[in-house]
């Protein structure tokens, strides 16, 4: 089997990959569907920001506990249980939309449920991947999962844009719930050894151990601090202002926004293909340079939100973001003990997400009180500066990879 697909040699990874692919395909339309469902009920950016903030706040509240549970219990079982919760909450949103009884407060409550469920899924997902394959195949495994994610991101938003504009957002919710129903029995085919840590200590002691692991690594907390700012900008400028401009600016439009998001996915897709074959020797150095590229579509969105130009900028940003995504996963999985990985990942997620509700609320307010172009251009400049400043930290600039993971094929340029 070629190096790019080497992770498929591992049985557990094959079943997990299939289950994850099903959920990514089914869920690829959900973000656009939810955004325009909210705007259909109340065409106000502040309402959208409230729904998004509810999801993120719930995620923040529960994510540390999700990390502890994922280090104690079988991670595949945790993911299955959360999928059941998602089916119920997403199905309820669809029913409310179909019957015309959806309101912003109800969507806020259901977003809280989804956020709590995701808070348990994410640390389990981060911790389970090294259990599914060998260290030599870890980059390929991460890149293959990103490949599917980006592939469905290309088609999903386009279909969602057309579907929402013609039939309404409820049908996208139905598709997502159906995908989760299919994925649960597929995930049951993954067989893993019992967790190394099964309890014997209090939850708060487990949290303290996870914090010690997190804080002992300067590269880890430096990048998490940077993403506190970067994610606030991303979720506010791109997640709130983007759909608002799409709905109210004829140069972009709802369908055009779908094409832009898809172009971002195409950039990710191209980069995943490269990363499936070429080892990434400096995962954090190249990753943070790649993240700085997101300033380009933010600036274009503010200056001239035409579909083609914005799609080209989003393509570049998507490619850069995938370098970081794969590099960050590798840095975590190769440098943190597996029995503590979910807890450390939960601190990463908490730090990265904690200011996102503020970002959604602030940008919801800004777009109604300030010039959108000025807000977006300034946001792009701050985003790039924060990303590049992390390179001044020696541990970020110098971090490499285990020789066994990169010795069997070519490599990305190193300097």
Image (tube, rainbow, N blue to C red):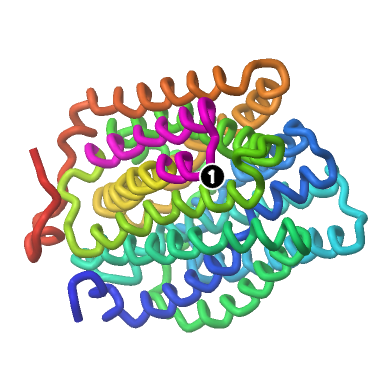
In-image side of 276 versus 316 (left or right):
left
Can residue 196 be seen by looking at this rendering?
A: no
Taking the spot 53% from the left edge, 27% from the top edge, the residue there is 302
When the figure is inspected, residue 389 is found, relative to residue 143, above or below; the finding is above
Q: What secondary structure is the stretch in magenta mostly built from?
A: helix
Q: Residues within 10 Å of mark 1 (few under 14, many from 20)?
A: many
x and y percentages locating residue 241 in the rendered image = 62, 33
Can residue 288 be seen by looking at this rendering?
A: yes
x and y percentages locating residue 66 in the rendered image = 55, 52
x and y percentages locating residue 48 in the rendered image = 73, 39
Quadrant that contains the C terminus: top left
Quadrant that contains the N terminus: bottom left
Which corner quadrant of the image does residue 133 belong to?
bottom left
Taking the spot 41% from the left edge, 56% from the top edge, the residue there is 266
In-image side of 356 versus 339 (left or right):
right
In-image side of 107 versus 115 (left or right):
right
Which corner quadrant of the image does residue 192 belong to?
bottom left
Disc 1, SS: helix
- 84 and 242: which is toward the camera: 242
- 253 and 198: which is toward the camera: 253
Name the residue that disc number 1 marks: 64
Span highlighted in magenta in the image: 285-313
């Amino acid at each position: 089997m070629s190096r790019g697909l080497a992770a498929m040699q591992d049985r557990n990874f094959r079943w997990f990959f299939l289950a994850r692919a099903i959920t990514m395909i089914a869920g690829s339309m959900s973000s656009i569907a939810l955004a325009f469902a909210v705007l259909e009920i109340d065409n106000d950016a502040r309402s959208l920001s409230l729904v998004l903030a509810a999801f993120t706040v719930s995620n923040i509240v529960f994510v540390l506990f999700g990390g502890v549970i994922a280090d104690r219990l079988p991670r595949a079982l945790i993911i299955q249980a959360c999928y059941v919760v998602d089916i119920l909450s997403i199905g309820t949103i669809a029913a409310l939309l179909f019957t015309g009884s959806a309101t912003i407060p109800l969507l806020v409550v259901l977003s809280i449920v989804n956020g709590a469920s995701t808070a348990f899924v994410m640390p389990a997902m981060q911790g389970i991947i090294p259990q599914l394959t060998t260290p030599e195949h870890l980059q390929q495994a991460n890149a293959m999962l990103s490949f599917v994610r980006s592939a469905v991101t290309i088609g999903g938003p386009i279909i969602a844009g057309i579907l929402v504009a013609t039939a309404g957002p409820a049908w996208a919710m139905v598709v997502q719930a159906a995908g989760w129903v299919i994925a649960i029995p597929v995930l049951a085919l993954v067989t893993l050894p019992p967790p190394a840590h099964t309890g014997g200590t209090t939850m708060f002691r487990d949290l303290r151990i996870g914090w010690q692991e997190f804080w002992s690594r300067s590269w880890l907390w430096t990048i998490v601090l940077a993403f506190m700012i970067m994610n606030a900008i991303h979720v506010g400028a791109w997640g709130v202002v983007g759909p608002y401009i799409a709905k109210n600016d004829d140069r972009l439009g709802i369908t055009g926004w779908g094409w832009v998001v898809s172009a971002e996915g195409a950039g990710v897709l191209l980069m995943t293909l490269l990363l499936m074959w070429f080892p990434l020797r400096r995962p954090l150095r190249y990753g943070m340079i790649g993240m700085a590229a997101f300033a380009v579509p933010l600036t274009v969105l503010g200056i001239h939100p035409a579909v083609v130009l914005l799609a080209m900028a989003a393509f570049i940003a998507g490619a850069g973001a995938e370098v970081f995504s794969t590099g960050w996963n590798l840095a975590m999985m190769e440098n943190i003990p597996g029995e503590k990985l979910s807890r450390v990942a939960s601190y990463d997620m908490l730090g990265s997400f904690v200011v996102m509700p503020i970002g959604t609320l602030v940008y919801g307010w800004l777009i109604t009180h300030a010039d959108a172009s000025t807000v977006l251009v300034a946001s792009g400049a701050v985003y790039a500066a924060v990303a590049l400043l992390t390179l001044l930290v020696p541990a970020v600039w110098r971090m490499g990879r285990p020789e066994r993971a990169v010795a069997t094929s070519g490599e990305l340029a190193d300097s």
